[in-house]
Amino acid sequence: MPRKPEGTSAAVALLPPITAAHARRVRETSTDDDAWAARWAHRFTDRLQAAEDGPLHSGRWTLARGMPGWGVPEHWQRFQAVDPDRGHITWFGYGDPDEDQRDVLPLRRLSPASAGRVRSYRRQLREGILPPALLWWVSGLNTLLVLDGDDRITAALAEQAVPEVLVLAPAADPELASAWQRRLVREYVGRMTSPHPARGDSVSRKLATALGDIARTEGRTRAWPLPGGPAAWERYATDLAPGWAATGQSQKWNSSSPTVAGFQ
């Protein structure tokens, strides 16, 4: 997947830069971490709804704090282990090569930890005011893409912290999600009313967590034809990563296993 050069972002026109003063004001006027996250979710929602070329389309969406339940915390350390001009992922979190197992894929070349903007964000992290990054679930890739906040993620990782994120995703089919939840509730009631019922708050907490995970289950990402068709897509890809097509074809024909050279 070709990536934009360092210093550019797929969301430049989508989400304008966040000043340190605004980040500090949001933190200082939030009563707790949940209120803080809600404030940023509201800001991101407003910007996404106003954007002409954003990812939103008609339908139900979720914007949830934190990584999904299927995320692997150790995969954050692989965030920066990507090619300089294109990104690779291993679908479903396994496969070869091992370094391509990740949950989050940036859309541009990452800035070094020593870059000025990253250093500024590192200071904000230490002050407790660093805004969350905005991730976008794309079902065709079975992964999360960074819509906004590549440098904020880099700053958090440089400080050995887990990045704060908000995850944007189309909602799963409500009837299917409701059926999953009803089944869990029935199982819970059965355990609690059995001759030897389960004891302890942990059972209730696990149910609440499971119901919450179902509520934010990612749905299918929709896509529309690109004006200009495959030829236009290849021009865009070549502008971002010259030689990507030749490399992909070489890997395809010289490998014993299938290789995906690109996606549409």
Image (cartoon, grey):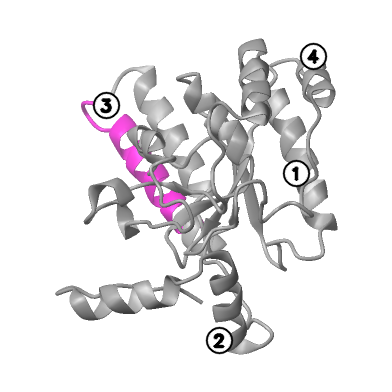
Q: Which residue is mark 1?
A: 44
Q: Amino acid at mark 4?
A: Glu
Say whether disc 2 or disc 4 marks the residue closer to the N-terminus: 4
* Direction left: furthest residue: 256
Mark identifier at residue 230: 2
Separation of marks 3 and 1 at Cα, in angstroms: 44 Å
* Front residue of 28 and 181: 28
Q: Earlier in the sequence, mark 3 or mark 4?
A: 4
Where in the figure is residue 160, as x and y percent of width and height? 45, 20
Write down the residue under mark 4.
Answer: 28
The residue most toward the front is 242
CA neighbours of label 2 inside 10 A, class few (<14), some (14 to 19), many (20+): few
* Residue 213 visible somewhere in the drawing: yes
* SS at mark 1 in the image: helix
Which residue is at 58% across, 36% downward?
Answer: 165
Between circles 2 and 4, the one closer to the viewer is 2
* Label 1 – label 4 distance at C-alpha: 19 Å
Q: Which residues are magenta?
A: 178-197
- Earlier sequence position, callout 3 versus callout 1: 1
Q: Which mark is residue 236?
A: none
